[in-house]
Amino acid sequence: MLAVAAAVVFVTIWSRAVWRQSQATLGDGSKVTLLGVVRGGENFTMETRWARLARRFLPAKVWGWVPPAWQPPPGAFSMGSSSNALVVFLRVDGAGMTGLDIGGSYVVEDGTGSAYPPGGSFGTFGVPTGFWGGAARSAPRLAAIQLQAYPRRQASFQLQLVGPRGLQGSVLRVPNLLRGPFPEWRASPMPQSRTNGPVILTLKGLAELGPKSSPRIKREWSLASSSPAWARATAKARPQIFFDPTGNEGAVLSRSEPVWKLRALVTRQDPADFAPEEQWAPTDLANPAPGEFAAVNQSAKPLGTDLKLLVLAGAGELVVSNGVAIAMNPPAAGGGSSSSVSSDAKSTIQKWSRPNPFLVVEAESLQPDDEVDFHLTDEQGREAKVLQNGYGMNGANGPNIFTVEFIPPAGARFLSVRMVVNRPLAFEFLVNSKEIRPPKP
């Protein structure tokens, strides 16, 4: 019995010591406790390894001394699908910290004081009533921050929280689950040029802009091409992020990593710069009235993709059952855009509500950087205003389906739709982060 008592005391003291070490108190008295860390896409459990061992070896009558156990349903506390991210789970006690405050007010720091920009996502979750004790109105909350950038070469790092109205908090020490080994990158001095097909893209320099609290980096490009179709192209970075060799990604990274990677895309803007095999133009489609639709079901394979124009619909709600349009309801007064999917063992019902006419397009075999641009004209050659240009990438569970909303010219009777597969040229640059010009005083 003495051994059991000693084990209970050890588990209790150890658990409380960890909680004290991993707790931050804000200026308004709110407390934030680090509960655990998982890789992105993994499930989080409220039970620690020590608590599991205690329940295995200690008598049931002393389990009340062990921190509470709770296994949430699979996927309940999984955030994001990228295993490159780290998800930090927190217990929040006190009315001062709301989910919005935590989600937008934290700084990751390494041991030298270098800060990493906030990124990723944030969420709050419900726990069973009474799990943490106390009245329902004052019960603690569970929060999670997904980190895309942090000092991955360290065994642990600092997470600085800031409370509501700028109330300063203390620091949580977070363990790192995603340590190396990491590749070695070698930067080239700027300006540096890369060639892909008919285009030579030169990165002339990078400059940091904006306040220190929310900096951004301006990219300075020079583009040359012997091809008239590409000479008018523009360079852009999509997405607008940098990468470092440890796996961090963000709009701005820590200068503790000397080498950053920038991936740029060069795209053409003028529809006249695309060859016939890069586009498809279904013609003579009747302009639908509100509450009406036409099942088009025409397809083509520009640049080896699979594009299918399924439906041309007027303003209103389109109902599709198992991939087949079956009904169109008139637009609701003052209604906006919405989409929904419901399914059972027999059917899947999709609904799209739009205040303007729209296309429903199915796309397969797109490459990761492909965009699909849409241009609509009426029988007089007048262009429709495209409000939502379609963009799709290969989906994991079948073809990508998206809608394209537009406003036709007044009095238009027929429409021609031209779909352009805009396949950009990709370029990569490795730069020395110390060459990025600092913001002007």
Image (cartoon, grey):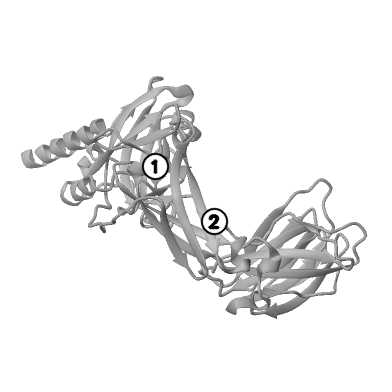
Q: Is 397 in front, or is 369?
A: 369
Q: Rounded to the nearest whole Å, what is the CA distance between mark 2 and mark 1? A: 19 Å
Q: Which mark is residue 181?
A: none
Specify few, some or many for label 2: CA neighbours under 10 Å numbering under 14, 14-19, or 20 or more: many
Give the amino acid at mark 1: Ile
Residue under numbered circle 1: 436
Q: Residue 392, how many percent across, how many down?
A: 59, 64
Q: Secondary structure at mark 1?
A: loop
Q: In this picture, is 207 found above or below 52?
A: above
* Quarter of the rendering occupied by the N terminus: top left
Q: Is residue 133 visible?
A: no
> Residue at image x 16%, y 46%?
58
Task: Using the rendered view, name the quadrant where residue 374 is placed.
Answer: bottom right
Q: In this picture, is 46 found above or below 288?
A: above
Q: Secondary structure at mark 2?
A: strand
Q: Residue 291, how many percent across, how many down?
A: 85, 61
Q: Is residue 315 visible?
A: yes
Specify few, some or many for label 1: CA neighbours under 10 Å numbering under 14, 14-19, or 20 or more: some
* Quarter of the rendering occupied by the C terminus: top left
In the rendered structure, the answer to whether residue 150 lies left or right of residue 270 reads: left
- Give the residue furthest to the top: 28
Task: Using the rendered view, name the quadrant where residue 8 is placed.
Answer: top left
Residue under numbered circle 2: 235
Q: Residue 180, how many percent across, how many down?
A: 24, 55
Q: Is 168 in front, or is 7?
A: 168
In the rendered structure, the answer to whether residue 351 lies left or right of residue 227 reads: right
> Residue at image x 78%, y 48%?
335
Task: Using the rendered view, name the quadrant where residue 111 is placed.
Answer: top left
In the rendered structure, the answer to whether residue 146 lies left or right of residue 349 reads: left
In the rendered structure, the answer to whether residue 246 lies left or right of residue 436 reads: left
Q: Is 68 in front, or is 340?
A: 340
Give the amino acid at mark 2: Ala
